[in-house]
């Protein structure tokens, strides 16, 4: 924080359909990978705060679980977290995959935000996938006419195209006020949670569709060895069926080995220290419909 002049702050929630690229955007805005990203829908399960300080301005972002049709209690919780996150902020970064039509839930959310007068920065993401850039024009007109967003910005987060324009727009909206977080803090996620999320992300990448949504990962122990610069991390992977457990472990343990090796590489990149990772797999049937279990896994957002 600079000493002369006044500090500024902005709280923004990132909302939109599942798989639109919200967590990818959060990571790009922060400049560090703090949120899990995967090609599978419903990757983000909790609200994640990311913080970026630029000059005298602190930008505080909340990544949310994507809007989707909830079929389990966990799904209900995820939707609740997404909806609550957009209720007490300065602006909403609404993200839409430009190759997909706007869903009903997203339209309702946009209608409500417009009614409340919440400024919306409307991002059309994944423009790299468009063969004809002219296909964007009618989308921009539709968004403009229906919701009059504060800004509409086409982006490709994976190509880092337009991300700076989003940052500039946010900086211009920051208001005078104290910084809420210490200058060196980039996320509210505890290290243990970051570690288990990195393992879950690899499971989402490597496993077949039916398994990932039934997987929860909990860090059992997280400690740095004093004699050497090594981080010891032990995680428990919970799944819903014996057959899923077999898939997670793989033939002769090959899948779990791969998950562990990839996750260890990511963990070392993030924590910038050598990591010794241990993984265990357990079955907890139907945990996604059991309140107690959801709470144990830290996935209850009611408190
Ligand atoms: N082609 C392309 N893919 C992208 C872009 N941005 C994100 N993706 C991909 O889209 C997928 C979903 O990205 P996420 O960031 O996990 O999406 P999300 O909106 O956070 O999804 P949930 O957490 O499930 O709601 C990943 O495979 C990303 O790599 C982009 O600009 N272009
Ligand atoms: Mg996400």
Image (tube, rainbow, N blue to C red):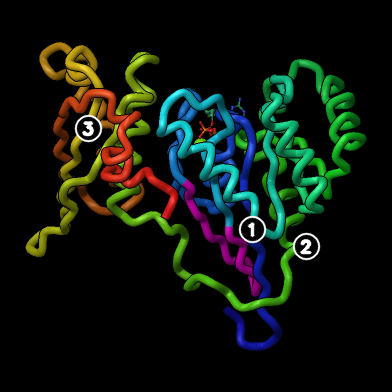
Q: Residues within 10 Å of mark 1 (few under 14, many from 20)?
A: few
**Which of 209 and 154 lies nearest the eye of the viewer?**
209
Residue found 39% across the figure and 15% down from its top: 209
Where residue 172 is drawn, which disc sits there?
2
Q: Mark 3 points at which residue?
A: 237
Identify the magenta region: 47-60
Earlier in the chain: of badge 2 and badge 3, it is 2
Instruction: Tell me, yes or no, if residue 266 can be seen here.
Output: no
Q: In which quarter of the image is ligand 1?
A: top right
Q: How far apart are marks 2 and 3 (CA)?
A: 43 Å
| Left or right, residue 170 beside residue 140 | left
Q: Mark 1 points at which residue?
A: 88
The percent position of residue 64, horizontal first and vertical second, equals 54, 43
Disc 1 is placed on an element classified as loop
Q: Does the residue labelled 3 lie within 8 Å of ligand 1?
A: no
Q: Nearer the viewer, mark 2 or mark 1?
A: 1
Earlier in the chain: of badge 3 and badge 1, it is 1
Residue 152 sits in quarter: top right
Q: Quick check: marks 2 and 3 in contact, CB under 8 Å?
A: no
Q: Which residue lies furthest to the left in this view?
A: 227
């Amino acid at each position: 924080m600079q000493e002369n002049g006044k500090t500024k702050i902005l709280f923004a929630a990132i909302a939109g359909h599942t798989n639109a690229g919200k967590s990818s955007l959060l990571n790009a805005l922060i400049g560090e990978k703090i949120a899990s990203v995967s090609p599978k829908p419903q990757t983000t399960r909790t609200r994640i705060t990311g913080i970026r300080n630029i000059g005298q301005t602190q930008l505080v972002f909340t990544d949310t679980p994507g809007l989707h049709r909830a079929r389990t209690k966990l799904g209900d919780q995820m939707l609740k977290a997404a909806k609550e996150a957009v209720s007490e902020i300065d602006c909403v970064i609404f993200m839409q995959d430009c190759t997909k039509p706007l869903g009903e839930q997203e339209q309702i959310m946009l209608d409500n935000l417009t009614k409340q007068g919440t400024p919306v920065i409307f991002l059309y993401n994944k423009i790299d996938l468009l063969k004809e850039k002219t296909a964007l024009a009618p989308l921009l007109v539709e968004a403009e006419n229906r919701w009059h967003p504060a800004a509409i910005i086409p982006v490709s987060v994976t190509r880092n195209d337009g991300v700076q324009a989003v940052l500039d727009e946010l900086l211009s909206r920051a208001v005078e006020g104290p910084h809420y977080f210490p200058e060196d803090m980039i996320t509210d996620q505890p290290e243990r949670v970051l570690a288990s999320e990195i393992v879950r992300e690899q499971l989402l990448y490597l496993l077949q569709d039916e398994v990932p949504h039934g997987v929860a990962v909990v860090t059992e122990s997280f400690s740095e060895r004093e004699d050497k610069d090594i981080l010891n991390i032990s995680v428990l992977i919970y799944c819903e069926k014996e057959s899923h457990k077999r898939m997670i472990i793989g033939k002769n343990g090959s899948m779990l080995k791969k998950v562990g090796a990839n996750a260890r590489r990511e963990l070392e990149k993030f924590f910038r220290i050598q990591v010794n990772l241990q993984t265990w797999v357990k079955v907890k049937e139907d945990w996604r419909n059991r309140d107690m279990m959801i709470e144990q896994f830290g996935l209850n957002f009611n408190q």
